[in-house]
Image: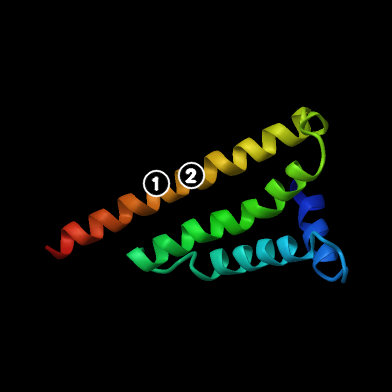
Amino acid sequence: MIGLPFCVWLIFTMFNFGNIDQPFAFLGIVGLVVSFITLNLKRTLKILLLDILCFTLLASPIVKRMTAVPIELFDYRAFIIPATMFVLCYIFSLYHSVIQYLQSKKAVM
């Protein structure tokens, strides 16, 4: 469930019809696509809200997997380190986007 295997899991699960994880894989792919589309756009309030929505969409497959099986199965470094880095880096990215938005709003005034 880390790095490339998780991306491969998202793609294959999205096309595995009848699987209960299929909607969450689809949400993860949608979040990934939207975040790539909004990557170089000027930070507005709408883009910031889209970034927050993308974070929840990208986290939904991970949360679904973590609630489907006992939490003890995720107690290993190969999962904890990338998952923690994803959350921390995305939160840092959101913080940086908010700072850019506030600076652009202050420059207009």
Of 65 and 96, nearer the camera is 65
Q: Quadrant of residue 60?
A: bottom right
Left or right, 95 with reference to 3: left
Amino acid carrying label 1: it is Tyr
Classify mark 1: helix, strand or loop: helix
Residue tagged 1 = 95
Q: Quadrant of residue 13?
A: bottom right
Left or right, 105 with reference to 32: left
Instruction: Give neighbour class at mark 2: few <14, some 14-19, many 20+ (Cα, 10 Å).
Output: some
45, above or below 90, in the image: below
* Marks 2 and 1 close (CB-CB < 8 Å): yes
Q: Which quarter of the image is occupied by the C terminus?
A: bottom left
Residue furthest to the left in view is 109
Residue tagged 2 = 91
Question: Which percent across, then down, holds residue 12?
Answer: 85, 64
93, above or below 69, in the image: below
Left or right, 109 with reference to 78: left
Q: Residue at x 16, y 65 (%)?
A: 108
Q: Which quarter of the image is occupied by the N terminus?
A: top right
In whole angstroms, how far apart are the C-alphas of marks 2 and 1?
6 Å
Classify mark 2: helix, strand or loop: helix
Amino acid carrying label 2: it is Ile
Left or right, 32 with reference to 97: right
